[in-house]
Amino acid sequence: MILRLQIRSNLLSPVGQRGLAAMAGKGRGVAAFTFHVEALGIGRGNMPEARVGPSPLFPNTDFKPLPLKAGEDEDYMLALKQEMRGTMQRLPHNIRPPSNKAEVEKYTERYLKQSQMEDEEWSPELMPQTKRRHPKPGTKKKPVISRKHTEEMLTKLDELEKKDDGNLENSDDETEKKTKNENDEEELEEEEYEEEDIEEENDYIESYFDNGEDFAADSDDNMDGEATY
Amino acid sequence: MTAQEVRLCGLLLQEHFGELVAKVGTHLLRSGAQNLRTIIHETGISMDLVKKSLCVLVQHGACVFSSGRKGPGSPTEYRSSCHQILRILRYPRYIYTAKTLYGDTGELIIEELLQRGDMTMSCTVKTVADRLTQNMEEGLSMDYSEVSTAFSKLVETHFLQRCPPMAVTATTKKATPADPATPATPGTPAAPVSTALPTPESFPDCYKVPQVTLIGRGKRQLPSEEGEDQRNAKKAKMSSEIHGDEGIYWQVNFERFHLHFRDQAIISAVANKLDQTSSEIVRTMLRMSEVTTSPTATCTKPLSANEIFRSLPSSYNISRPILDQYLTLLVDDPMEFVGKAGESGGGMYVVNLHRALTNLARATLESVVQERFGSRSARIFRLLLRKRHLEQKQVEDFAMIPAKEAKDMLYTLLSHNLVQLQEIPKTPDYAPSRTFYLYTVNQLPTARMLLQNCYKTVANLIERRLFETKDSKRLLEKSQRIEAILASLQASGAEPEQLTEVEEMITAPEKQQLDGLRLHINKLDSAENQVDETIFLVESYINSSATS
């Protein structure tokens, strides 16, 4: 920090450049300053060491910390804290991420009550109250869309796997029409979002199989194992 | 929201509400106000789960929603702030205070409300009565009316308050339940986008206890098998009686608790510095000014010595002249807790709240420096606090420390940002040879830095505790299983040989490891609680400086 101070003050003085060069002391080892160092109380020989790298992650402490307060109050509050943590983790509002069941059933799962493990049910006392408080328009429609949308995607994927390339574009058109019809009913936001998705995918698939007919025809003829390049 | 605050909030949310809520919460904290679509897109969590997490956050007051910035038609925006989440650290202290003031009933009421976020009065009363009945002996049960009286007392002293009812916007088709007990805010239609959300206190019925018909006693939950439990749970859900207070939700009033803690800190400081009688006098003065002082006032309203004399508790038989002497002593004390505001009525006295907080924060800073850098560095620090600006030479002289060591200590303090350097130029070109360099300490910025260090400390403690638990997860699970087996064996009446056999399933070194682990975790938890006391003090000081 003392070096920082020097740089800051030397920027304004006309001999700043020389001062900096002198401070770097390349090959010199003697610090030459442009002002009276005595003003800051440093002598020539007692410059603090230059930093060689970032400060250590776990520096040594010269003084050990005081022991914690220990008494009835503290013990009671400690017990309260641990109890509260435990209860809050068991309440239904503690949402666990949906995890896949491991193949090997762990010991703990067998001994804990079923009700604790399966808390997918949302406790009714929490939901209705907040739903009343949310002045959100059109919330009911959004989850419906997502479910239908995923079903469409799955059917589309199945169709893509089974049918040939020639029929692909037909099915794409069909699904596109279906989705377009449904989207007309919904809000503008979701329309744009989903139409973009569908259109992009269709574009991708069409351009990819641009030369589809020729490719498919060739592979059908040479099914007996001759390599095509 | 500094990085340390966000990190600590994330850890607290994770511990109490699960990883998903923590993810949504930290995202909201980092990015400010956002609408639902953006949150889903940026966190990558499914919509269902995001909605659930937001509900949980709103229920506990950690997140607020308002109509969007672009006008009444735009989607609602959610924003979250660190303050509410950081209160989670202080929950044990709130519960313990309620216990000292209102006994077990009060303690359980506050605990239930803190765990659930907000609840109706009838629901709280029933749950608390059931819990109390569980701990009572066979045949006894807790009456609802006792719990209701405790609840009303908490509301009267403003420790509990009603949740602010939501304003009805024009776009909602659903109407808030028409309930005669709820003075619902008459639908402010298409409210102009207000930047400030209404505080609970801006509603006139904030502290009014509703007329609730609650007659009954607590039910004892008998130990039954799983099937019965589920059936009973279902039955409880079916029998939803209307008690006349649907729609009125109560939450804990944290600010009131904070005022109480602040008063306690001042009283204990006086007791430590002077003596018990002086602290009683200050306690009386604070009690008398509880209702007349606003939360952000810098000092209480002036009280005359006559009034104080009349209001002293009867157990303290001190005569009038001795009271006057005590008051003079308090006024002359350098900590400036009590000040004299006039001569009428035998002397008008005030409690200087802001100055008391400043001095307490300053004492905390000094003790931090002392414990980290030694008593001589602390002497230099105190010197600079008192004398404001000093040159290098003057520091050495006043502190009576040899030059070399004083220099070292000053530079160490400077590199830790506890001491700042102030340049005073003699000439306009800031030539170093013609500039004064003075060392100084600014209390407010240093206090802010200390606060951030405290947040970092607590976050580190939590992480260390999680690491230790994760390390020995297998061992902890094994011990839990063994305890469960033991309990079931004892309940079904087994022989002592079987019990010892089960106990020996944990080997001795494992037991040692478990004991060591338990000790570490208790220490880390206790440390969190105690760092929170420092956090409270420094936070109060910073808030009081901001408003004054």
Image (tube, grey):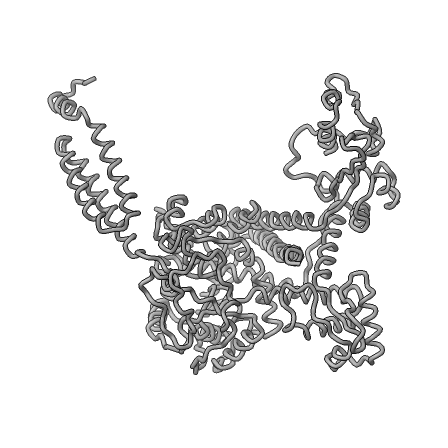
Query: Which of B213 and B171 lies nearest the eye of the viewer?
Result: B171
Q: Residue furthest left?
A: A221
Query: Which of A125 and B465 lies nearest the eye of the viewer?
Result: A125
In the image: residue A225, left or right of residue B452: left
* Number of residue marks: 0
Residue B449 lies, in percent from the top left, at 66, 47
Query: Which of B177 and B173 lies nearest the eye of the viewer?
Result: B173
Q: Quadrant of the C terminus of chain B?
A: bottom right
In which quarter of the view is residue A178 placed?
Answer: top left
Residue B186 lies, in percent from the top left, at 40, 69
In the image: residue A66, left or right of residue B141: right
**Residue that appears at 87% across and 46% down:** B398
Q: Is residue B464 visible?
A: no
On screen, B466 above or below A43?
A: below
Residue A122 lies, in percent from the top left, at 36, 60
In the image: residue B80, left or right of residue A26: left
**Residue that appears at 53% across and 62% down:** A83
In the image: residue B89, left or right of residue B485: right
Residue B354 lies, in percent from the top left, at 70, 61
Query: Which of B96 and A172 lies nearest the eye of the viewer?
Result: A172
Q: Is residue B209 visible?
A: yes
On screen, A104 above or below B244?
A: above
